Image (cartoon, rainbow, N blue to C red):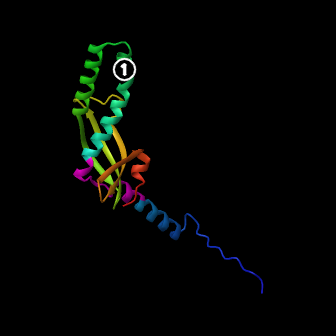
Amino acid sequence: MPDREYTIQIPLFSKRGIAILAVVIALAAWNIYVVQKEAPEAVIEPLRHALAAEYGRAALPGIQASLAENDQAGVTEQVDELLANMDGIEVSDVSARGTGDEICIRATIRVNGGPPPDGRTVRYFLFSRSTLVGWMYQRDASAFEYYLTFF
């Protein structure tokens, strides 16, 4: 008995092909526009801490240079500016995609009423939830990753 190979061919411009294409487009549109939700309030504080650490790392070389030059006034000024920036981090327009213990966050960031030091006002982040410590920052994400997060 010869082995038979079965294939299914659906012409793209047939009624069946157009119906399948319409379903795929509808699911993609639904994923992009409908599956957004409000982020949990518990995510905002860990996000502020992660951003403060990131912006603080950028200021460390200047502080180290002032320390090497024994410039106490420069160190004090830079540390005061660093602390003011950490307290002035504002996170707004926070939305989330994903379910369960892993979500992707889109947030608008401002520092002391202006743009952040790196100039990126809209950023994307991945968070996971732990039963012991709550929501934890995992890493930065891309807009592509945010919009491709299902449910």
Residue 53 at x, y = what percent? 33, 36
Quarter placement of the C terminus: bottom left
Q: Quadrant of residue 59?
A: top left
Residue 115 is covered by the magenta coloring: no
Residue 107 at x, y = what percent? 30, 43
38 w.r.t. 111: above or below: below
Residue at the far bottom in the pictured view: 1
Q: Quadrant of residue 11?
A: bottom right
Q: Amino acid at mark 1?
A: Gly
Label 1: which residue?
Answer: 62
For label 1, the SS is helix
Q: Residue at position x 33%, y 49% from top? A: 105
Residue 63 at x, y = what percent? 34, 21
32 w.r.t. 46: above or below: below
Residue 1 at x, y = what percent? 77, 87
Q: Is residue 78 left or right of residue 142?
A: left
Residue 42 is covered by the magenta coloring: yes
Q: Which residues are magenta?
A: 28-43
Q: How many marks?
A: 1
6 w.r.t. 70: above or below: below
Q: Is residue 39 left or right of residue 146?
A: left
Mark 1, Cα crowd under 10 Å, few <14 / some 14-19 / many 20+, is some
In this orientation, which residue lies closer to the viewer: 24 or 140?
140
In this orientation, which residue lies closer to the viewer: 71 or 3?
71
